[in-house]
Image (cartoon, helix red, strand yellow):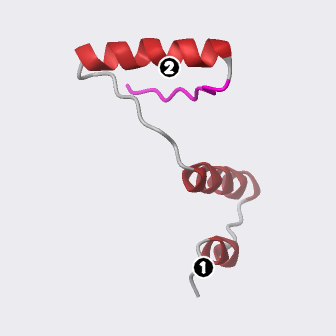
Amino acid sequence: MKYTITIDDNTKAGSSLLEIAKGIAKNYKSVKVSKISEEDEWIASEIDKSIKTGKADKQKVLSRFNIQ
């Protein structure tokens, strides 16, 4: 099983945890640290909304990325 942890590195605890995770990731291939882009967060929240409501707004997603 795999897990995802979201860390706010603007806080003291988040920054400390991030440094620990980076240190562990250097020594173990089973741990990976990667940044999440704003677009990824936005898409994830839209997917969650769609799952809850049962409706997806394709036009909203296309306009977000300037796709016609």
Q: Residue 18 carries which label?
A: 2
In the rendered view, does 20 fall on the left or right side of 58? left
Q: Is residue 5 magenta?
A: yes
User: Image check: 11 left or right of 30?
Assistant: right
What residue sits 60% from the left and 51% below the top?
Answer: 38
Residue ID for mark 1: 66
Q: Is mark 2 on a helix, strand or loop?
A: helix
Q: Where is residue 68 in the image (x, y as percent from the top left)?
A: 59, 88
Residue closest to the eye, 42 or 8: 8
Q: Does the magenta stretch include residue 17?
A: no
Q: Is residue 4 above or below residue 37?
A: above
Q: Is the magenta stretch mostly helix, strand or loop?
A: loop
Q: What residue type is labelled 2?
A: Leu
Tag 1: amino acid: Asn
Q: What element carries label 1?
A: loop
Instruction: Residue 54 in the image: state x and y as whole percent.
Output: 71, 60
x and y percentages locating residue 22 in the rendered image: 39, 20
Please tell me whether residue 56 is drawn above or below residue 62 in the rendered image: above
Callout 1 touching callout 2 (CB < 8 Å)? no
- Would you identify the image quadrant in which residue 32 lies? top left
Total numbered circles:
2
Which quadrant holds residue 34? top left
In the rendered structure, which disc, 1 or 2, sits on the residue that comes first in sequence? 2
Residue at (58% x, 56% y) in the render:
39
Cα distance between the residues tagged 1 and 2? 33 Å
Looking at the image, the residue that sits furthest to the right is: 53
Eyeballing the image, is 31 above or below 68?
A: above
| Magenta segment | 1-10
In the image, what residue occupies the spot 27% across and 22% down? 30
